[in-house]
Amino acid sequence: MKMNRTVKLLMFSDIFVLTGFGLIMPILAIFIKETLIGGTIFAAGIASTLFIVSKSLVQLPLSRYVDAHKDNVKWLIIGTFLIALVPFIYIFATDVNQIYLAQIFYGLGGGLAYPTWMRVWSTHLDKKHESFEWSLYSTSVGLGTAFAAVIGAAIAEFIGFAYTFLLVGVLSLLGCFILFGLERKKKKLKRVDAYDYHKQRKFVHNKHY
């Protein structure tokens, strides 16, 4: 089965970004508690809450905008870029308040990226293959995240937290870079549409004169 190029780009981008953050999942609370000033288990809970709340506050109003406009890829790229910055903030964090700031950035990025990703994905699924493509996405991201959890914990244990965060940042930036393929595709389609428009005008002009 030949898969839509847009669907492929979105899937590969999420594999890099979500697999990357899967490296952090098992270790973030430990990192906060053991290495940061003011770090406690309670502080780790606050960090998670800040992410979810900030994401929720952004994504709902943005989804209304996304539904009403066609040119939305830029929000997906901006959101994914903000997400990619978060691991680098973790690297240099010394105080739990810096983690709180990183989590707000994470939520803001997620709030920008999620509704836009859903819009682009749902409008480009191949007809009669929707279930397969959703399942392929879920399986790919799920397996990637599962293996990443073990690898991330091992890197943090034997090499250090900073190396885990650095790897996450690099993977997330690669995921963001992949999304620029959507912009190139959009510009190509605009050129094709312009060509067809002028071709049609020429045809109408010749027909009447």
Image: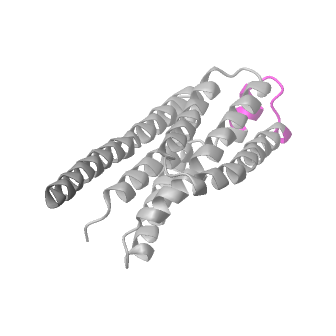
Say above or below: 127 vs 119: below
**Percent of width and height locating residue 101:** 73, 29
What span is colored magenta in the figure?
Answer: 30-42
For the N terminus, the image quarter is bottom left
Residue lying furthest bottom in this view?
Answer: 128
Q: Quadrant of residue 91?
A: top right
Q: Quadrant of residue 132?
A: bottom left
Does any portion of residue 105 appear in the rendered image?
yes
Q: Residue at x 83, y 35 (%)?
A: 40
**Percent of width and height locating residue 204:** 21, 58
Q: Nearer the viewer, residue 94 or 179?
A: 179
Does any portion of residue 26 appear in the rendered image?
no
Say above or below: 124 vs 130: above
Residue lying furthest front in this view?
Answer: 209
**Percent of width and height locating residue 143:** 46, 59
Q: Is residue 35 magenta?
A: yes
**Percent of width and height locating residue 48:** 75, 44
Q: Nearer the viewer, residue 39 or 88?
A: 88
Q: Residue at x 37, y 79 (%)?
A: 128
Q: Nearer the viewer, residue 125 or 162?
A: 125
Tell me if 174 is positioned left or right of 189 in this view.
Answer: right
Q: Quadrant of residue 106?
A: top right
Q: Nearer the viewer, residue 185 or 109?
A: 185
Q: Residue at x 63, y 50 (%)?
A: 65
Coloring applied to the structure: one colour
Tell me if 206 is positioned left or right of 149 in this view.
Answer: left
For the C terminus, the image quarter is bottom left
Q: Is residue 171 magenta?
A: no
Q: What secondary structure characterizes most of the magenta part?
A: helix
